[in-house]
Amino acid sequence: MKIFNTQTRRKEEFKPIEPGKISMYVCGPTVYNLIHIGNARPMIVFDTFRRYMTHKGYEVNYVSNFTDVDDKIIKKANEENLPANEISERYIAECKKDMEGMNVMPATTHPKATEEIDGMIDMIGDLIEKDYAYPTSDGTVYYRTRKFKEYGKLSHKNLDDLESGHRSEGHALKVTGNSDKEDDFDFVLWKPKKEGEPAWKSPWCDGRPGWHIECSVMARKYLGKTIDIHAGGEDLIFPHHENEIAQSEAANGVPFANYWMHNGFLNIDNVKMSKSLGNFFTVRDIAEKYDLNVLRFFMLTAQYRSPLNFSADLMEAAKSSLARICTAVEHLDFLMKNASAEAMTDEEKENEAKAAEFITRFDDAMDDDLNTADAISVIFELVKFVNMTALESSSKEYLASLKEKIVLLTDILGIKVEKKEELLDADIEALIEERQAARKAKDFKRADEIRDELSAKGIILEDTRAGVKWKRAD
Ligand SMILES: [Zn+2]
């Protein structure tokens, strides 16, 4: 398996620290709103990487955090007059629903920043002791960026270039308002609380951690001082991941991550997605129009490092492409019902061997820095081969082996190609009866739940004078 390592800017053969195991950290979302489709890309891409490596026999320890303390969360909490943790808990739950819809597996561990404050205070204290950080008079603790000699090694920036850049542009690195700050490049590890903000006790002041420190602490706690892979969107390379390296390597004295993987940007109709441009889509917006399986498939039609353009037309195209795979599987199911249990003919055996070559080619594409675009092309070639050879076959064994191959490959990508199980008429009627009983007992919550459950499975209820009628949605 070759992985493009952002730090070395080369494709490298992947060698795990411990044979057969992978420790992987993926930066997760800040939970103050429904996740948008830009957040969805790293979730889908790195979930696919995890599924593929699991298929290759690795045991993947996958850690992805929820940033649940942040200015945006606090702002939203104040707007809604609620405690910040109610906002973050709400959007963690919503995020998990979206992940499930996109068939993104839950991480091995999903740590939350607010539950790891002690570890952050420890690491900050350690950095102060090692002289890589310093508290100022108001209790803010800064990281002494220039002291970390390798700063910039991931993003390939150097401080002198950055300095001239930010003098002229007022670069975002510059944090003003604290005269005790030694250098413009120093970044915040701990900041004092302001009125109406959640805060924790620390040796420096009551306050809260900066964003970067949480990932360094969680990666070490759940995966160790040196991890195999650190991943995230390319917008995180600088400064977030650069700062994580500075913190972790200064504190631990060993390399932080052996491979850095970053996914490319997602654009909408070829322009950057932004709320102000009105081209902003949450995953929930997409779910109103499409099965999220289509969104996942669409995202994987590009190699993860390429920029990905999202548009209504491209989603429609993805939907019909995916339908071609589903139709082939459906067709095989149909043929299998009437097929015989006879052994395969020599021709079928030969064809089965040919079909197996598609699996090798799929693996080759995935081994080349997770080239899902090429891997999907291979699936389409397999589908074409299936459509060409299946009709002439009456061997159940042969047809089943074809279906198995399509399902194997689409499963690795986390794409579902088999029809959802349909409810039997008797089950539907039993649920309707239960709903009627719940309504009689004034248990409207349960009654609504049943209605939702049925509607999720495509059953539409209609309350009429003559009683409840139902039909299947088209
Ligand atoms: Zn992070």
Image: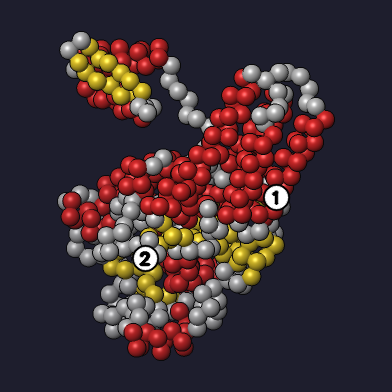
The residues tagged by marks 1 and 2 sit, at their Cα atoms, a distance apart of: 34 Å
- Residue density around tag 1, few if under 14, some if 14–19, many if 20 or more, within 10 Å: some
What is the three-letter code of the residue carrying label 2?
Lys
Query: Which residue is label 2 attached to?
Result: 272
What is the three-letter code of the residue carrying label 1?
Arg
Q: Can you tell which mark lies on residue 361? A: 1
- Residue density around tag 2, few if under 14, some if 14–19, many if 20 or more, within 10 Å: some
Q: Nearer the viewer, residue 31 or 310?
A: 310
Question: Residue at position x 33%, y 45% from top?
Answer: 284
Q: Nearer the viewer, residue 207 or 240?
A: 240
Tell me where residue 410 appears, x and y as whole percent.
58, 41
Tell me where residue 356 appears, x and y as whole percent.
73, 41
Question: Residue at position x 70%, y 28% from top?
Answer: 392
Question: On the rendered image, what quadrant is the C terminus found in?
Answer: top left
Question: Measured along the vertical axis of the image, is residue 409 above or below residue 163?
Answer: above
Is residue 113 visible to the viewer in this orientation of the structure?
A: no
Q: Earlier in the sequence, mark 1 or mark 2?
A: 2
Is residue 73 found left or right of 158 in the rendered image? left
